[in-house]
């Protein structure tokens, strides 16, 4: 289904999506990475590693300890973060929401907490709460790429592509004004990449290509829109037109992405998401995060 492809990343467009921004969970990322799957826990135990029963008991004890601290000091942020951490590792996402909401309230300028809150509410099925968390970020920071991508993904799962398109078009229409007020507050290229992906997911290939071409015209040294256009042409069966673009994207891209782009040019499928990555809506690999981080910090990805 279309919404499922958006969530876990389609073979054709997951690569472009990965280059758009940081993981939807920049703050949760280290926590999720630290979690072990049941299979990993059993394997570790079989190899003489930590006993999974003891691990579970230790996490539960730790969570109770943080709760006791919070009974005395409700605003203790160390305890709040520790409780969030413990409950994530216990798989208790419902239990994450209350302390995370409190952290977000105590730190109104820290968007990471709000992004994580939106993602967590999405995971537990509170779509209205998730959308509101993302919109709270966008009210203060209309160009926040993580919030935009989270809200777009949510709208796509609700089969509301036109709402997603409208959100991104509105962001682009006000980008110049926003960037005049605060330079770099809207990463126009990243927003265009998201819009191009939505169009492509909807089979609106001409509009997708036009969007990527508009990005290419402005960010001529950025490999991402070139790769996006190549993937759309490949999807349409225009492989002869796509191949020079794949080559151009590989030439512009940092070295760590060249092999991946070449595999895409050959039509090789991207690796399927793991259980961990599915939980984080196909969070990019560390290398992809590094490229996206460069984009977020204002550095245009380019070849060395």
Image (cartoon, rainbow, N blue to C red):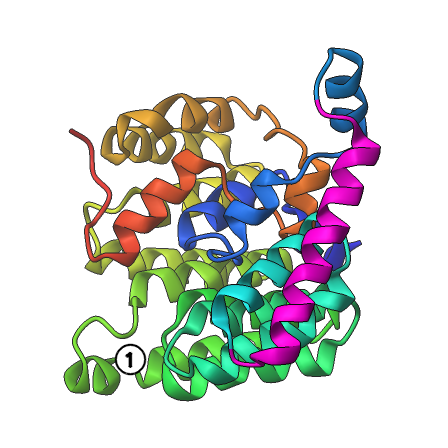
| Extent of the magenta region | 50-75
Q: Residue at x 25, y 29 (%)?
A: 251
Of the 4 image quadrants, the one containing the C terminus is: top left
Residue 156 appearing in the image = no
Q: Residue 80: x, y in percent?
A: 57, 68
**Residue 232 belongs to the span the image colors magenta:** no
Instruction: Identify the residue at image location x=79%, y=43%.
Output: 57
Q: Nearer the viewer, residue 122 or 217?
A: 122
Work out whether 18 lies above or below 70. above
Q: Which quadrant holds the N terminus?
A: bottom right
Among all residues in the image, which is located at the extreme top?
47
Query: Do we see residue 109 in this rendering?
Result: yes
Describe residue 258's horizontal placement relative to residue 31 as left or right. left
Is 193 situated left or right of 103 in this image? left
Q: Main secondary structure of the magenta part?
A: helix
Say left or right for 158 vs 283: right
**Secondary structure beneath label 1:** helix
Which residue in the structure is indicated by mark 1?
Answer: 175
Image vertical order of residue 68 relative to residue 89, above or below? below
């Amino acid at each position: 289904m279309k919404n499922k492809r958006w969530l876990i990343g389609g073979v054709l467009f997951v690569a472009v999506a990965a280059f758009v921004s940081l993981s939807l969970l920049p703050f949760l990322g280290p926590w999720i990475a630290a979690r072990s799957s049941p299979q990993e826990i059993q394997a570790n135990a079989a190899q003489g590693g930590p006993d999974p029963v003891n691990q579970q008991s230790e996490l539960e004890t730790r969570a109770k300890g943080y709760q006791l601290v919070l009974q005395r000091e409700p605003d203790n942020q160390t305890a709040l973060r520790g409780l969030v951490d413990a409950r994530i590792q216990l798989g208790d996402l419902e239990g994450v929401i209350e302390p995370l909401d409190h952290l977000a309230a105590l730190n109104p300028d820290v968007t990471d907490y709000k992004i994580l809150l939106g993602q967590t509410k999405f995971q537990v099925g509170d779509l209205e709460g998730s959308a509101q968390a993302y919109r709270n970020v966008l009210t203060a920071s209309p160009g926040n790429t993580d919030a935009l991508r989270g809200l777009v993904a949510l709208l796509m799962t609700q089969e509301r592509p036109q709402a997603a398109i409208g959100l991104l078009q509105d962001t682009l229409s006000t980008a110049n004004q926003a960037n005049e007020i605060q330079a770099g507050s809207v990463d126009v290229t990243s927003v265009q990449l998201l819009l191009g992906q939505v169009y492509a997911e909807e089979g609106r290939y001409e509009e997708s290509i036009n969007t990527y071409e508009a990005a290419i015209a402005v960010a001529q040294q950025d490999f991402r829109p070139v790769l996006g256009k190549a993937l759309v042409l490949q999807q349409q069966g225009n492989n002869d037109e796509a191949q020079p673009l794949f080559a151009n994207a590989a030439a512009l891209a940092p070295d760590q992405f060249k092999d991946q782009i070449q595999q895409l040019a050959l039509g090789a499928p991207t690796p399927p998401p793991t259980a961990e990555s599915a939980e984080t809506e196909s969070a990019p690999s560390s290398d992809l995060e590094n490229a996206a981080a460069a984009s977020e910090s204002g550095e245009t990805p380019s070849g060395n």
